[in-house]
Amino acid sequence: MLSRRIKLFRIRFFDTAWHSEISSSAERTIARLSELCAPVFTPPQTDRFLIESRDFSTLFHDEDNPLRPLAQKWRVSFGHFDPASSRWRCVTSSCRG
């Protein structure tokens, strides 16, 4: 398209009905074709997943906490984490690569 000496470009496409667009720019026509061919996805608005900061020590001291087994599994699998840090990080020599 860019190598031709065409002055007008016409795009016909079907959305819910047939549409036609005319452009004098090959670059704009290519950009519009890219827009039309891009998948349309709108993520649903939901409060299903909420992110909250928590103190890691509560996972180990509260036996009824549903996340306690996950935290114990992580600690056994990867070593020991530093609770002073906001992130879990490995502090054993075997984890430092």
Image (cartoon, rainbow, N blue to C red):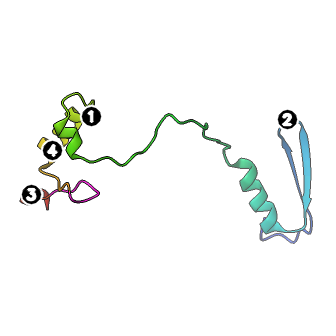
Q: Residue at x 92, y 69 (%)?
A: 7
Q: Amino acid at mark 2?
A: Thr
Q: Mark 3 packing: few (<14 Cα in 10 Å), some, or many (20+)?
A: few
Q: CA distance from mark 1 to mark 2?
A: 48 Å
Q: CA distance from mark 4 to mark 2?
A: 54 Å
**Residue 67: image tag:** 1
Report whether residue 7 is seen.
Answer: yes
Which quadrant holds the C terminus?
bottom left
Query: Can you tell which of label 2 and label 3 is closer to the viewer?
Result: 3
On whether residue 59 falls in the magenta region, the answer is no
Q: Amino acid at mark 4?
A: Arg
Q: Which residues are magenta?
A: 84-90
Q: Secondary structure at mark 4?
A: helix
Query: Can you tell which of label 1 and label 2 is closer to the viewer?
Result: 1
Q: CA distance from mark 4 to mark 1?
A: 12 Å
Q: Secondary structure at mark 1?
A: loop
Residue on which disc 4 sits: 75
